[in-house]
Image (spheres, rainbow, N blue to C red):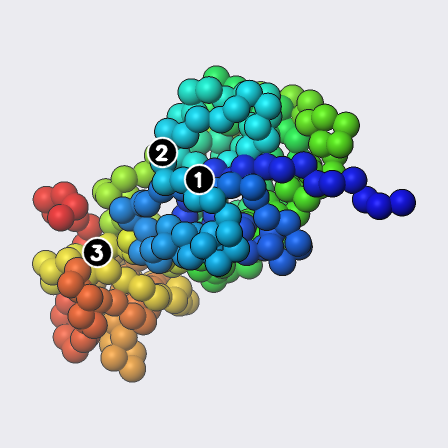
Amino acid sequence: MSEPEQQPFTCAGVGLKAYEYLRDLDALGVRPARMISYRQGTDQLSSFDSIADFCTENAIPLEESKRPSFAPDELVFMVGWQYLVRDASSSLIVFHDSLLPKYRGFAPTVTAMINGESRIGVTALKPVIEVDAGPIIGQIAIQVRYPMAIADALKMQAQSMSKLTINILAACANGIPDGVPQNEEEATYSLWRDADDYWLDWSQSADRIARTIDAVGPPYEGAHSLYNGQEIIIRAAQALRDVMFETRQPGKVWKLEDGAPVVVCGQGMLKVIQAETASGQQVIFDRLRSRFSGQSHGFK
């Protein structure tokens, strides 16, 4: 007996996650009937262009829109979507980048990585008016070890989303699953992030600063700091064993190690391995008496 024909579906997705999701689905022999996406001005990896190329190569119709319309019975999987869908139906399934009900809201993966969570994950849910509070259709947890780049975390989440999609498509033969209500008593939230949040706070621990640098790297803008009054972007750093100072002054350079400054933090020390100016030029560290600090007059 032949297998039942797969139910057609639409993907509304943006960013690196959506591109990797399409590739992972394709590797599993599944493609959406149509794709909806849009450009993100802050995406350093130009993921929309990659999505467009993939759709062209695989004859998938692509619509560039932030406010798409869906048919009442159209099965839609949403990946990384950031705009309100006004005509959401019971056939719309949202992928959220956390193990709900933890980390509802904005940039959950970035926040979880900065916090040093041992697990991140993906949840498939039905949308409701309250943010990320709908019934859970499925979840996959991902064990993580630090250091870990945000791009690697997003790729792992995309792979988990593709697996959940396959499972949900199989279940859809009997109708879209109702899902399981979330436990409201366990809900936590992740606040939105803006340009100010790319600036490092040197009063934090070296471990947390190192995780922040990794969490806001490509496809995001990178971790910003002032170095002797000049705006720089720190691309790579390493937390080191602490030194006991009689007077602790976070941000001051303690020593240069193979041309890399070792910076005093609120707790611990941070070795800045790679940094560049706002214009993309490599920063040469050759002065011991130097200081790293937070923004002084806002993000430029």
Which residue is tagged 3? 225
Mark 2 lies on residue? 66
Q: Is residue 25 left or right of residue 168?
A: left
Q: Earlier in the sequence, mark 2 or mark 3?
A: 2
Q: Which of these two is toward me, 57 or 119?
A: 57
On residue 65, the disc is none
Foreground tag (3 vs 1) = 1
> Measured from the top left, where is residue 86 in percent x and y?
42, 20
Image vertical order of residue 83 relative to residue 55, above or below: above
Q: Position of residue 293 (x, y in %)?
A: 19, 54
Instruction: Kindly identify the amino acid type of the residue bearing the numbered disc 2.
Output: Lys
Q: Are marks 2 and 3 in contact (CB under 8 Å)?
A: no
Q: Residue at x 27, y 62 (%)?
A: 234
Which class describes the residues within 10 Å of circle 1: few (<14), some (14-19), or many (20+)? many
Give SS at disc 1.
strand
Taking the spot 40% from the left edge, 26% from the top edge, the residue there is: 84
Structural distance between the alpha carbons of marks 1 and 2: 8 Å
Q: Residue 36 shows which numbered tag?
A: 1
**Mark pair 2, 3: CA separation:** 33 Å
Q: Is residue 2 left or right of residue 250?
A: right
In the rendered image, residue 170, in percent from the top left (x then y), is placed at 74, 38
Q: Earlier in the sequence, mark 1 or mark 2?
A: 1
In the rendered image, the quadrant that contains the N terminus is top right
Regarding residue 67, the answer to whether it shows in the image is yes
| Crowding at mark 2 (Cα within 10 Å: few <14, some 14-19, many 20+) | some
Front-most of residues 294 and 100: 100
Q: Residue furthest bottom?
A: 258
Q: Secondary structure at mark 2?
A: loop
